[in-house]
Amino acid sequence: MRLRAVLALPALLLLLGPAAAGAADPQTNLPDVEDEVMCPICGTLLELSDSPQAERERQFIRDQIDQGRSKDQIKDALVAQYGDDVLATPDSGGFDLTAWIVPALGILLGVLGVGWAILKLARRRASGEAAPEIDPAEASRLERDMSSYDL
């Protein structure tokens, strides 16, 4: 009898796991959706717009939330109601794909550039290479220029 209870407990937890996880999902709210959709009239984020159309769109979202819809379902309903331009994120294909790729490439190139500079600096310090000597004429000119700024 005890063995059955021990074996049934993991099976029960597996069955209740998805239901408990679904219950733990937070309910969608207006600010969650507002910062990801646009006002179709203004072309600005819905959270920044105060046009009458933006108010109608907010009410539409509130109605969807009251019906228990998820964020993705609400965004799908907004697209059906107002068209693809209502979404604040670009499409994941065609020319709009560049809006995703260019920033990612810029960040990647920046990280690689900083890494290369750090590696080069570390190698220079490890080799004991000193900074290049300044020409004496340039050094005296620099001293003259700097002394003119002394108070």
Image: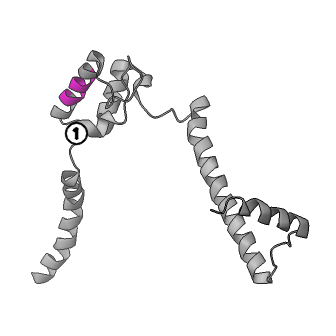
- The residue under the point 34% across, 31% down is 75
The one of 103 and 49 positioned closer to us in this rendering: 49
Task: Identify the amino acid type marked 1.
Answer: Asn
In the figure, 10 relative to 38: above or below?
Answer: below
The one of 12 and 125 positioned closer to us in this rendering: 125
Q: Indicate the position of residue 62 as horizontal and vertical percent values.
A: 20, 30
Q: Indicate the position of residue 76 as horizontal and vertical percent values.
A: 35, 30
Predominant secondary structure, magenta span? helix
Task: State the residue lying farthest toward the left.
Answer: 1
- Tell me where residue 3 sits by quadrant: bottom left
Circle 1 is placed at which residue position?
29
Q: Indicate the position of residue 50 as horizontal and vertical percent values.
A: 28, 23
- Specify whether 148 is left or right of 35: right
| 61 falls in the magenta region | yes
Whether residue 70 is visible to the viewer of this picture, yes or no, is no
First to last magenta residue range: 57-63
In the figure, 44 relative to 36: above or below?
Answer: above
| 103 falls in the magenta region | no
- The residue under the point 20% across, 44% down is 27
Whether residue 26 is visible to the viewer of this picture, yes or no, is yes
